[in-house]
Image (cartoon, grey):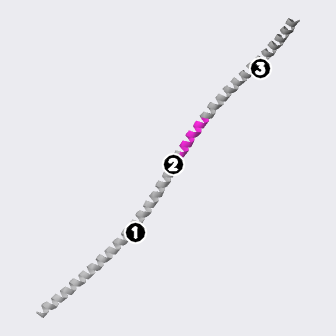
């Protein structure tokens, strides 16, 4: 019976040794897996930061493009308004010139008529 007990004990030791090796292998695999996972997470976070920066740059470029478009629209409006006001100014100057000419003509007629009236008054007194 000692032989059976001895073999049982050796078997138990072998099982414990195998269990210990398996536990060591599992622990090592867990450590390797966690290290690989941490590395992967770090790479993903880095890529995510890079993509966020790219998105921010694209948003800034898009905003800049929208601002440029708005500024171009404003420029076109001011250009059109300036041309309209210039045409209006030309028309106003023309109207002012015509009014000035009519005023000068009326002054001339007034002076002529005044002189004629004074002459008629002198003739009627004499």
Q: Nearer the viewer, mark 2 or mark 3?
A: 3
Q: Which residues are magenta?
A: 67-79
| Residue at (45% x, 61% y) in the render | 49
Q: Quadrant of residue 30?
A: bottom left
**Residue tagged 1:** 39
Q: Position of residue 14 (x, y in %)?
A: 21, 85
Q: Tell me the crowding category of disc 3: few under 14, some 14 to 19, or many 20 or more residues within 10 angstroms, Cα based.
A: few
Disc 1/disc 2 C-alpha distance (Å) = 36 Å
In this orientation, which residue lies closer to the viewer: 36 or 48? 48
| Residue at (81% x, 14% y) in the render | 114
Residue lying at the far front of the rendered structure: 125
**Residue tagged 2:** 63
Q: Earlier in the sequence, mark 2 or mark 3?
A: 2
| Residue at (41% x, 66% y) in the render | 42
Residue lying at the far right of the rendered structure: 126
Q: Earlier in the sequence, mark 3 or mark 1?
A: 1
Q: Main secondary structure of the magenta part?
A: helix
Magenta residue check for 71: yes
Magenta residue check for 9: no
From what the image shows, is residue 102 above or below residue 44? above
From what the image shows, is residue 5 above or below residue 48? below
Q: Is residue 82 left or right of residue 22?
A: right
Q: Which mark is residue 104?
A: 3
Disc 3/disc 1 C-alpha distance (Å) = 95 Å
Label 2 sits on a secondary structure element that is: helix
Quadrant of the rendering where the N terminus is positioned: bottom left
């Amino acid at each position: 019976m000692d032989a059976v007990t001895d073999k049982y004990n050796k078997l138990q030791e072998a099982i414990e040794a195998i269990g210990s090796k398996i536990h060591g292998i599992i622990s090592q695999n867990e450590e390797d897996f966690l290290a690989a996972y941490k590395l992967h997470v770090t790479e993903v976070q880095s890529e995510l930061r890079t993509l966020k920066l790219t998105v921010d740059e694209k948003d800034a470029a898009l905003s800049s493009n929208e601002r440029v478009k708005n500024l171009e629209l404003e420029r076109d409006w001011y250009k059109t308004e300036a041309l309209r006001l210039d045409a209006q100014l030309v028309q106003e100057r023309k109207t002012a010139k015509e009014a000035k000419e009519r005023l000068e003509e009326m002054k001339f007629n007034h002076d002529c008529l005044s002189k004629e009236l004074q002459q008629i008054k002198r003739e009627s007194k004499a």
